[in-house]
Image (cartoon, rainbow, N blue to C red):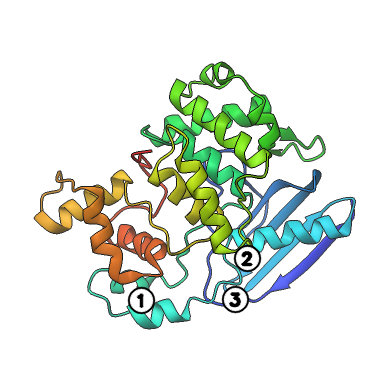
């Protein structure tokens, strides 16, 4: 397949993360950080990659039959890794903040790593509800193996389409260890996306995205945490914080009481992070890092 290549200078210091555990991203064989994944643009496969040979240099490429599809795949990778995010306003405002200032100064390249496909963010959020993260990853990898789209040349797998998930009987997802309520919620959510009633596009107007959130919240088994994970990781909404995440409930409990076992209510988390608007999601990542936890990547258990 023809390959389209781009070079970019990040708008703000950036360091690529690792590939994660879910099997979507794969590390390339390079002497520097490099990742690739399979995406689909208008149903056509694109193998997209991102590399960081030097701190201020990013290389991106997309392999597809249609160069326009390859370019669209590159654009989605730029979004996922925050290549074009200008975080100067955030850093200027919070570099001396008593809670997150230390992390902001010591790790300016920290990002909330997003997903190049917002539907992935929705599916994974449902899988990760009220469950230990490693067990959720096993379910996610099983969904990829059983129902995902595979590129024979690279061996990479992409998520199934919303139409595929909407057409599944919940029992098929339960067979992969997804709980019955979450399986039904995921099928209904996929149906809303497939019918166009929920728009996940990160480039859609905020009002359109938020209309979709309300429709998702009307589905039994989908609550604030799931929608906020979709918004933050799938749509790039830094103003959204998954306040029901166990990591935040414990972090704020420890900050308020000094007791490492203390937990607070979701409303207490929202109150603590309210002064960081409209950057609550990124502020939360720095707070978790400063609290000794890997930002957004350990025990992701929310209310729903």
At 48% from the left and 34% from the top, the residue drawn is 127
Q: Quadrant of the C terminus?
A: top left
First-in-chain label (1 vs 2) = 2
- Does residue 160 appear in this view? no
Q: Is residue 231 left or right of residue 168?
A: left
Q: Quadrant of residue 5?
A: bottom right
**How many neighbours does mark 1 have within 10 angstroms: few (below 14), some (14-19), or many (20 or more)?**
some
Task: Give residue 126's position: percent from left, percent from top.
Answer: 48, 36
At 28% from the left and 58% from the top, the residue drawn is 270
The residue at which mark 2 appears reads as 52
**How many neighbours does mark 3 have within 10 angstroms: few (below 14), some (14-19), or many (20 or more)?**
some
Q: What secondary structure is marked by label 3?
A: loop
Instruction: Give me the C-alpha separation between circle 1 and circle 2.
Output: 22 Å
The residue at which mark 1 appears reads as 105
Nearer the observer, 127 or 100: 127
On screen, 207 above or below 138? below
Instruction: Give me the C-alpha separation between circle 2 and circle 3.
Output: 8 Å
Task: Give residue 217's position: percent from left, percent from top.
Answer: 45, 42
Q: Is residue 280 left or right of residue 267?
A: right
First-in-chain label (1 vs 3) = 3
At 33% from the left and 59% from the top, the residue drawn is 289
Task: Give residue 220's position: percent from left, percent from top.
Answer: 43, 32
**How many neighbours does mark 2 have within 10 angstroms: few (below 14), some (14-19), or many (20 or more)?**
many
Q: How many marks?
A: 3
Instruction: Give me the C-alpha separation between circle 1 and circle 3.
Output: 18 Å
Q: Are marks 1 and 3 in contact (CB under 8 Å)?
A: no
Q: Quadrant of residue 74?
A: bottom right
The residue at which mark 3 appears reads as 56
- Does residue 150 appear in this view? yes
The mark lying in front, picked from 1 and 2, is 1
On screen, 53 above or below 144? below
């Amino acid at each position: 397949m023809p390959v389209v290549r781009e070079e970019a200078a990040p708008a703000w210091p950036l360091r690529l993360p690792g590939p994660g555990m879910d099997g979507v991203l794969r590390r390339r064989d390079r002497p520097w950080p490099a990742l690739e994944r399979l995406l689909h643009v208008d149903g056509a496969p694109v193998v997209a990659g991102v590399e960081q040979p030097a701190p201020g240099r990013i290389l991106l490429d997309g392999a597809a039959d249609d160069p326009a599809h390859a370019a669209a795949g590159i654009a989605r990778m730029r979004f996922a890794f925050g290549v074009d995010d200008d975080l100067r306003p955030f850093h200027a405002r919070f570099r001396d903040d008593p809670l997150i200032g230390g992390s902001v100064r010591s790790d300016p390249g920290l990002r909330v790593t997003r997903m190049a496909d917002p539907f992935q963010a929705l599916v994974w959020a449902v899988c990760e509800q009220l469950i230990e993260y490693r067990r959720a990853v096993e379910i996610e990898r099983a969904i990829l193996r059983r129902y995902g789209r595979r590129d024979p040349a690279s061996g990479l797998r992409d998520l199934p389409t919303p139409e595929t998930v909407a057409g599944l009987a919940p029992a098929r997802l339960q067979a992969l260890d997804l709980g019955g309520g979450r399986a039904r919620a995921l099928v209904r959510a996929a149906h809303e996306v497939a019918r166009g009633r929920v728009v996940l596009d990160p480039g859609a107007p905020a009002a359109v995205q938020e209309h979709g959130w309300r429709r998702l919240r009307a589905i039994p088994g989908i609550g604030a945490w799931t929608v906020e994970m979709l918004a933050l990781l799938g749509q790039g909404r830094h103003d959204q914080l998954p306040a029901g995440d166990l990591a935040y409930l414990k972090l704020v409990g420890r900050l308020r009481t000094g007791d490492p076992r203390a937990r607070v209510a979701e409303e207490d988390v929202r109150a603590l992070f309210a002064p960081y608007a409209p950057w609550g999601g990124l502020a939360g990542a720095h707070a978790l890092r400063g609290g000794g936890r890997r930002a957004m990547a350990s025990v992701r258990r929310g209310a729903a």
